[in-house]
């Protein structure tokens, strides 16, 4: 371990001592009146004055993590004899460390993307990440118009003391699940697919000269598709590198490739004599397909999913290791597509990320798989680890006595007498009985009618869809503010008391908004009523008969009925707030001051 | 000849509605009935009930009925009488099914006569064996939960008997039932006629019965003559039954009380249709149902409270020692559940205020109930 270095140096024209710690992590300067210290890890640059200058000094540029601009410290070595030597010592001691730090800093930037890429896409972002990801929130808002509407409406109505960031933090805090689902949706990518089968040639009519032209073939090819073609069929890459730009231009290359026999062979279609014979591609027609397979076989990790030794005795068909009938290389194939498709699938899967397990895990089964796969049915039952749930019935409370004191004996005697009295069942109801029975009937019929009315009228309210939408919007925003209000109210945080008072005002404003919506609905209804009346008058004038006018529903009453419970909730919140406020103001005025304690 | 005069369809169980079983649970708390006697004496109520049951039996020869008495401390069979019969010690009211007073037997339809006689005898026996101390002790108690359990047991057995192939060899002992009915499916319902109020101690049992009834497809109808049965309201709502309270009325003069006429009308109009008929009718529900439950510690009805996450028992306030009363698990409370709201801004000086007691618990329309979580 290096030892501490003590040098005499001056900083800002003050004499003092410069100390480098033994572990070379910090540099401290102490002067008569002041001191300075810095961490070597923060140093980005170290410079020294040239040997020819009079003073031996050293300049350290330090970038502290919190600050925007780097600071520079200049130390002048003041030793009368060995200033230069000290300068050299200092510089040497720190130079390596600083260089190493620099490399680490740069090196950190690059390895970091890779662990991220390895991270499986199903890993979920934490709540804080989702809350702070504004881009994600904006994209979710742009996709879901209803959510956007709610957000905008609530934003419009919010009190001014609440900042936008506070507001949006509260808004999203109850909708984190939406954010998470959206994030997962966005992260999904399309997997590899067989490109050659997707690229199609369209026969496009072109008009040339006298109006009758040849059909030209058009196709579109994107960059990703080109890359996919190269990765799925390396032979195409080879040809491309050979031919372009020497023989063909790029467009030309692709145009010729997609009509060539080679392309058909790669797709697996049969090659007929009608296909154009393009010399440049056709020489590769007889390429060896097995060359492409090297990547698959040199994969670093092949999971052991099949125990060939174990299956030796267990193989009922004993066909050996020859590939499946569809996979055998057969130059006289009448339907090469079967083999080609299978091979293409194999290539695609080889390029896709493996789902078996992290590629860097040790080869072989891991502990958990081993435990799962083991046979267990002949083992003795293991000890029961269950925790029994005790569930006791509540003790029955003593029955409440009324105090009216019906004597028990009398009661029993009375009922005994009642029961043993011989009586005939009444043959008819008396007058009183009749009256009672009629009123009971009316009671029942009233109830039935009410039930019918309740069941039937759950749909139509009589408001137009616009009115309904604005009523819904008012309700939604009011509920948002109520949420916010109760959240702040029960947080018990004294510093948010101002916020609370503004929120209470906003809630009252929501009531006014609801009233405004009701008014608009009412004017609409008035209009409808007027029209109806006009119609009825017309009818009367024409035929002399009165048209029966049904009362027009909707309007203020309907809106009020819809928003009744919302208004009740707002008023409840308001009452509670005012009550607590009055109590606390009184307590404050009295000056009673035991310490405020929270449970 | 039978095919010509078309008498078959009256007794055809395959095409007609299935037989219906009605279980009547009658609250027989003497104190409650004594309190009711000015407007509705027990005798008149029994007459109305009798007429109602007769009507039910008259609808179809395959209909059955059972009457249970939910007494202060036990449940007793009223009809059909238990095999050992009412005790021989009572005077003359006990009878084996044959020995009816001849006058009545002559003019009455036999099943109705048997029904009336058995009910009278059993109730007389029941009241004769009730001691005044028991009545004084259990002021307005009635074992509704026990009666519901007994009724559901009976219904279950009857349904098993009625199922084709299942236990069909056992004789069907309830009078008024034909053997023709044994093969068809049985629809059942329970009617609770109560004169007392809820007992908090029976809450969990009533809820269990409610779920069982839901499972069996049994409707629980409730008609309260006095007092409020909150839990039975929920039970009726959950099982598609009808719950109503008989309206009050003036006491009558001589003769049968007028309120019994109202009782009869209610029974006949709202409670007579069986499950098959109810599909075609709109039942007169009581409107709003009070869905509140009661707390475990004090048996008070609550609408906001604390719930143990392991055994789901409800408390109105955190239990002492933070241990759940029924499953003995330690509970953790949410961090700020009883924070007193601070509504007034703090003054800049060093003095701190003590906020008045705000309600941390059990208030607020928009906030959800707090949840206690157990520690590992």
Image (cartoon, coloured by chain):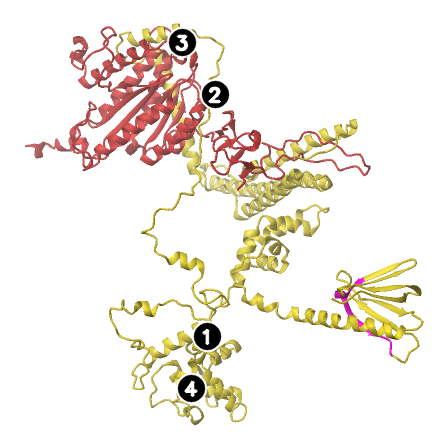
Q: Are marks 3 and 1 in one subunit? A: no
**How many marks can you see?**
4
Q: Which residue is mark 1?
A: A299
Label 2 Cα crowd, 10 Å radius (few <14 / some 14-19 / many 20+)? few
Classify A173 as above or below B5.
below
Where A129 sits versus B68, above or below?
A: below
In the image, the segment drawn in magenta is A38-50
The chain carrying label 3 is B
With respect to residue B4, does A420 lie above or below? above
Q: Quadrant of the N terminus of chain B?
A: top left
**Which residue lies under the disc numbered 2?**
A397
Answer with left or right where residue A123 lies relative to residue B67. Answer: right
The residues bearing labels 4 and 2 have C-alpha atoms spaced at a distance of 91 Å
User: Crowding near pointer 1: few (<14 within 10 Å), some, many (20+)?
Assistant: few
- From mark 3 to mark 4, how far is it between C-alphas? 106 Å
The image quadrant that residue A590 belongs to is top right
Q: Are marks 2 and 1 on the same chain?
A: yes
Chain-order first, disc 1 or disc 4 = 4
């Amino acid at each position: 371990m290096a030892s501490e270095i003590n040098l005499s140096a001056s900083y800002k024209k003050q004499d003092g001592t410069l100390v480098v710690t033994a572990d070379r992590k910090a540099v401290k300067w102490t002067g008569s009146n002041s001191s300075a210290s810095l961490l070597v890890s923060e140093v980005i640059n170290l410079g020294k004055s040239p040997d020819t200058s009079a003073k031996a000094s050293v300049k350290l540029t330090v970038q502290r993590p919190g600050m925007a601009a780097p600071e520079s410290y200049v130390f002048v070595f003041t030793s009368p004899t060995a200033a230069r030597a000290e300068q050299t010592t200092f510089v040497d001691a720190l130079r390596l460390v600083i260089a190493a730090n620099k490399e680490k800093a740069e090196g950190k930037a690059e390895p970091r993307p890779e662990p991220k890429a390895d991270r499986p896409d199903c890993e979920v972002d934490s709540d804080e990440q989702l809350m702070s990801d504004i881009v994600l929130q904006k994209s979710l808002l742009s996709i879901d118009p209803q959510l956007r509407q709610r957000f905008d409406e609530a934003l419009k109505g919010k009190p001014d003391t609440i900042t936008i960031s506070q507001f949006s933090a509260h808004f999203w805090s109850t909708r984190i699940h939406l954010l998470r689902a959206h994030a997962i949706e966005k992260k999904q990518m399309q997997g590899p697919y067989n490109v050659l089968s997707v690229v199609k040639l369209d026969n496009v009519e072109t008009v040339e000269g006298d109006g009758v032209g040849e059909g030209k073939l058009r196709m579109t090819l994107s960059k990703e598709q080109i890359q996919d073609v190269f990765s799925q069929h390396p032979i195409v890459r080879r040809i491309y590198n050979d031919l372009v730009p020497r023989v063909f231009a790029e467009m030309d290359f692709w145009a010729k490739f997609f009509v060539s026999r080679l392309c058909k062979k790669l797709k697996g279609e049969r090659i007929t004599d009608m296909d154009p014979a393009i010399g440049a591609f056709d020489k590769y027609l007889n390429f060896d397909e097995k060359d492409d397979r090297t990547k698959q076989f040199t994969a670093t990790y092949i999971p052991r999913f099949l125990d060939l030794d174990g299956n030796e005795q267990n193989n009922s068909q004993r066909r050996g290791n020859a590939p499946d009938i569809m996979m055998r290389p057969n130059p006289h194939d009448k339907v090469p597509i079967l083999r080609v498709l299978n091979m293409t699938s194999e290539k695609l899967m080889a390029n896709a990320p493996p789902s078996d397990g992290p590629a860097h895990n040790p080869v072989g089964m891991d502990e958990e798989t081993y435990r799962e796969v083991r046979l267990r049915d002949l083992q003795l039952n293991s000890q029961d680890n269950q925790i029994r749930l005790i569930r006791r019935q509540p003790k029955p409370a003593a029955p409440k006595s009324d105090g009216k004191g019906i004597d028990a004996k009398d009661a029993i005697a009375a009922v005994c007498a009642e029961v043993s009295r011989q009586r005939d069942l009444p043959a008819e109801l008396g007058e009183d009985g009749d009256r009672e029975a009629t009123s009971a009937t009316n009671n029942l019929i009233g109830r039935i009618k009410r039930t019918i009315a309740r069941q039937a009228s759950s749909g139509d309210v009589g408001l137009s869809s616009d009115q309904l939408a604005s009523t819904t919007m008012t309700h939604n925003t009011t509920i948002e503010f109520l949420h916010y209000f109760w959240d702040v109210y029960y947080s018990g945080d004294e510093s948010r008391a101002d916020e609370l008072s503004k929120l209470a005002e906003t809630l009252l404003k929501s009531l006014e908004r609801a009233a405004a919506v009701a008014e608009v609905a009412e004017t609409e209804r008035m209009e409808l009523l007027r029209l109806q009346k006009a119609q009825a008058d017309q009818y009367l004038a024409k035929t002399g008969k009165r048209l029966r006018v049904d009362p027009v529903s909707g309007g203020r009453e309907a809106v009020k009925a819809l928003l009744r419970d919302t208004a009740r909730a707002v008023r409840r919140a308001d009452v509670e707030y005012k009550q607590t406020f009055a109590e606390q103001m009184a307590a404050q005025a009295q000056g009673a001051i035991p310490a405020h304690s929270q449970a | 000849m039978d095919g010509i005069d078309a008498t078959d369809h009256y007794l055809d169980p395959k095409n007609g509605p299935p037989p219906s079983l009605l279980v009547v649970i009658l609250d027989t708390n003497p104190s409650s009935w004594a309190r009711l006697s000015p407007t509705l004496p027990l005798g008149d109520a029994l007459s109305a009930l009798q007429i109602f049951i007769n009507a039910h039996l008259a609808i179809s020869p395959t209909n059955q009925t059972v009457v249970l008495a939910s007494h202060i401390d036990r449940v007793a069979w009223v009809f059909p009488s238990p095999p050992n019969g009412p005790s021989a010690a009572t005077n003359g009211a006990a009878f084996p099914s044959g020995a009816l007073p001849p006058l009545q037997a002559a003019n009455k339809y036999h099943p109705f006569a048997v029904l009336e006689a058995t009910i009278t005898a059993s109730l007389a026996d029941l009241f004769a064996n009730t001691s005044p101390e028991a009545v004084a002790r259990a002021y307005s108690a009635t074992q509704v939960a026990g009666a519901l359990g007994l009724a559901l047991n009976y219904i279950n057995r009857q349904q098993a008997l009625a199922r084709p192939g299942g236990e069909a060899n056992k004789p069907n002992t309830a009078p008024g039932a034909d053997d023709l009915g044994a093969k068809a499916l049985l629809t059942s319902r329970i009617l609770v006629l109560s004169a007392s109020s809820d007992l908090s101690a029976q809450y969990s049992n009533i809820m269990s019965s409610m779920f069982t009834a839901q499972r069996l497809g049994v409707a629980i109808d409730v008609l309260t003559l006095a007092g409020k049965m909150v839990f039975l309201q929920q039970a009726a709502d959950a099982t598609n039954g009808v719950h109503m309270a008989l309206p009050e009325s003036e006491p009558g003069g001589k003769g049968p009380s007028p309120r019994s006429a109202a009782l009869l009308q209610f029974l006949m109009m709202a409670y007579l249709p069986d499950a098959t008929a109810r599909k075609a009718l709109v039942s007169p529900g009581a409107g709003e149902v009070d869905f509140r439950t009661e707390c475990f510690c004090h048996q008070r009805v609550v609408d906001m409270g604390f719930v143990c996450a392991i055994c789901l028992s409800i408390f109105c306030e955190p239990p002492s020692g933070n241990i759940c009363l029924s499953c003995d698990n330690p509970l953790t409370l949410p961090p700020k559940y009883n924070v007193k709201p601070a509504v007034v801004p703090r003054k800049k000086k060093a003095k701190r205020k003590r906020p008045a007691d705000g309600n941390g618990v059990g208030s607020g329309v928009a906030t959800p109930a707090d949840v206690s979580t157990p520690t590992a």
